[in-house]
Image (cartoon, rainbow, N blue to C red):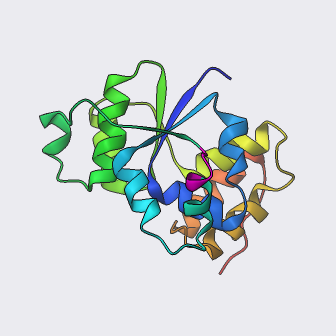
């Protein structure tokens, strides 16, 4: 587990709300939170679990030196841009992104990435959770937006679990 993960806000928010934030610590050697992502998380209500985690010192807050034009051209939000800029600066890291446009940008820039669903699948394969299906259901209830077909296919192929219809 020598991997550094650079997290965007939505994976942190949904994992914290669903009670799975600890999985990031178990899956990655180092968790980095770009300052624009930290600002977004800290703007949440005082009771928000992601905000509470960040305020308690969870993750390492860091600012990219600059956001390269290759990232700016995509017109992404400041959080996504911060994740991608840091990913270009830091060797041997993985961007953790759920936003479709940010994921397209990461692919175009050859940045290794994973999403919240991918993190859950890794956790299941590592024996950190008993059921990826139950975790994904909790994440959906916490606001994760993923297509049922994507979930169904991913669960079946990666860990041999089934996704309920509807």
Estimate the x, y position of residue 136 in percent, counting from the top left: 68, 63
The reply to whether the magenta stretch includes residue 57 is yes
Quadrant for residue 77, please give it: bottom left
Q: Position of residue 25 (x, y in %)?
A: 68, 39
Q: Quadrant of residue 87?
A: top left
Q: Residue furthest bottom?
A: 166
Q: Is residue 5 above or below residue 92?
A: below
In the rendered image, residue 106, in percent from the top left (x then y), is placed at 33, 38
**Dominant secondary structure of the residues highlighted in magenta in the image:** loop
Q: Find the magenta span and give its range.
A: 54-58
Residue 158 visible in the shown view: no
Q: Is residue 40 above or below residue 7?
A: below
Residue 65 shown left or right of residue 51 in the figure: left
Q: Residue drawn 65% across and 43% down? A: 24
Q: Is residue 104 visible?
A: yes
**Side (left or right) of 136 relative to 65:** right
Question: Which residue is depicted at the point 69% across and 66% down?
Answer: 18
- Residue in front for this viewpoint, 44 or 11: 44
Q: Nearer the viewer, residue 107 or 67?
A: 67
Res 149 → quadrant: bottom right
Q: Quadrant of the N terminus?
A: top right
- At 73% across and 62% down in the image, what residue appears? 19
> How many numbered marks, from 0 up?
0
Q: From the top left corner, tell me how far across and down residue 14 is, in percent.
A: 58, 63
Q: Residue at x 71, y 69 (%)?
A: 138
Q: Is residue 112 above or below residue 44?
A: above
**Horizontal arrangement in the rendering, residue 29 relative to residue 112 (left or right):** right
């Amino acid at each position: 587990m020598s991997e550094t993960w650079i997290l965007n806000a939505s994976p942190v928010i949904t994992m914290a709300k669903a009670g799975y934030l600890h999985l990031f610590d178990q899956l990655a050697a180092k968790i980095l939170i770009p300052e624009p992502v930290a600002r977004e998380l800290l703007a949440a209500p005082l009771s928000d679990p992601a905000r509470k985690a960040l305020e308690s010192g969870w993750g390492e807050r860091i600012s990219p030196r600059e956001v390269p034009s290759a990232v700016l051209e995509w017109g992404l939000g400041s959080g996504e841009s911060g994740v991608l800029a840091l990913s270009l600066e830091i060797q041997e890291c993985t961007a953790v992104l759920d936003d479709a446009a940010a994921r397209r940008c990461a692919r175009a820039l050859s940045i290794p990435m994973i999403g919240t669903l991918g993190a859950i699948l890794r956790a299941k394969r590592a024996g950190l959770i008993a059921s990826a299906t139950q975790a994904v259901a909790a994440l959906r209830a916490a606001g994760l937006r993923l297509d049922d077909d994507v979930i169904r296919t991913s669960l079946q192929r990666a860990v041999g679990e089934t996704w309920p219809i509807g």
